[in-house]
Image: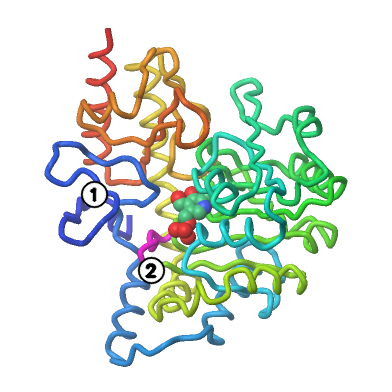
Amino acid sequence: MTFDFSSSIDRSGTGSLKWNKYAGKDILPFWVADMDFRSPPCIEEALRARVDHGLFGYTVPYKSAEDSVIDYMRDAHGLEIQREWIVWMPGLVPALNTASRAFESPGDGVLTFTPVYPPFLTAPEWQDKELIALPLKLDDGRYTFDWEKMEAAVKPNTRLLLLCNPHNPVGRVFSREELEQLVDFSERHDLILVSDEIHCDLILEPELKHHSILSFGERAVKRSLTLMAPSKTYNIPGLSTSFIIIPNPRLRMRFQRASRGMITEINCFGYVGCEAAYRGGEAWRKELIEVLRRNRDRLYAFVAERMPRVKMVPMEATYLAWLDVRDLGLDKPAAWFESHGIGLSDGALFGTPGFVRFNFGCPSEWMEKGLQRLGAAYDAIE
Ligand SMILES: Cc1ncc(COP(=O)(O)O)c(C=O)c1O
């Protein structure tokens, strides 16, 4: 390994959301999607150089940062995007909320699929929209869309479809066929497709490929918003920098109008981190994928051997494992694990009680401690 994926760095005193939750308690955090790895050296160097400049004024999108996004989307994903399609934002959670606000009248519907990253469920509600949250279908141990239920649930006033691709928390990299069918569905029901692709550079299965919604031709492109950020892959969510690709000028204008006055310039360091990641982070990302694959496989093996009543679905992407703990008969599974010293995310927040999410984006030393506690919590169940 060229890069450091093994140091366990003390994050206390840095305001870490992940670690602060359990400050002063003997609970190890394996919850929020934030890894415990130091970011790529190219990002540290670029940020240091920006600090040395000494001027930190209001910063608007600038050419080299935009170019890095355009080049990255072309080189890594084969997508030709245009400069004016890019809308920068301090996060994708504000983007999900802005999208839910921008395209509909109060009471109109937003369709999404559970389990899902919780802001997909809260954004429509917070923006006074009707939420249609349909369960993904578990087909032979693999989650996929339930076409029959979707056709039955969609209504004339459903305007938006929120897609997580690759999917957090079930770890699916949806196939070209599944997504083609989803585009057909969106076209037939005249839905705007909001595709959150923040995890697209974290595919763990070498034979799988990310299919961006932007790769499905004009009929998909013109009705789409693609949500992207370097934050998950390069572990820089604290730089609060993401971008939305909106090719259709009418949709782009409505989206920008809906956030007017509430979202202004992003942090000057965010552009620097993004550009450095996209220009120089690839070697680091490749090693990261190896480390994550090893951690995922270790977790599979542990769950299979030590926790036979728990099921872990195959994780094709992300560093977030989705564990089915329904057989354990726990009322509040995450609370049970917390009381045994391990902080997980509860499935109820994702619209699916009876599951927990385990973040394995951490050095092996933390991982082993986490597994020990997971096993002890399991053994303590009557
Ligand atoms: C699917 C998905 N979208 C968005 C986010 C958060 O994005 P941001 O930090 O840009 O608001 C996460 C974080 O876990 C996520 O998993």
Range covered by the magenta-colored residues: 233-239
Q: Position of residue 34 (x, y in %)?
A: 36, 52
Query: Which residue is found at the position 63% from the left and 59% from the top?
Result: 101
Identity, as a three-letter code, of the amino acid under mark 1: Trp
| Residue 202 in view here | no
Rendered-image quadrant of the C terminus:
top left
- Is 106 placed left or right of 312 in the picture? right
Q: What secondary structure is found at the residue carrying circle 2?
A: helix
Instruction: Determine the residue located farthest toward the top in the rendered image.
Output: 382
Around disc 1, counting alpha carbons within 10 Å, would you say few (fewer than 14), some (14 to 19), or many (20 or more)? Answer: many
| Residue 147 in view here | yes
The foreground one among 334 and 42 is 334
Q: Position of residue 261 (x, y in %)?
A: 53, 76
Q: Position of residue 257 (x, y in %)?
A: 64, 73
User: How is the protein colored in the picture?
Assistant: rainbow
The quadrant holding residue 182 is: top right
Total numbered badges shown on the rendered structure: 2
Q: Is the CB of the residue bearing disc 1 within 8 angstroms of ligand 1? A: no
- Is 136 placed left or right of 12 in the picture? right
Instruction: Determine the residue located farthest toward the left in the rendered image.
Output: 24
Mark 2 or 1, nearer chain start = 1
Query: Which residue is found at the position 72% from the left and 71% from the top?
Result: 80
Height in image: 212 above or below 376?
Answer: below
> What residue is shown with label 1?
19
Q: What secondary structure is found at the residue carrying circle 1?
A: helix
Query: Which residue is found at the position 79% from the left and 57% from the top?
Result: 220
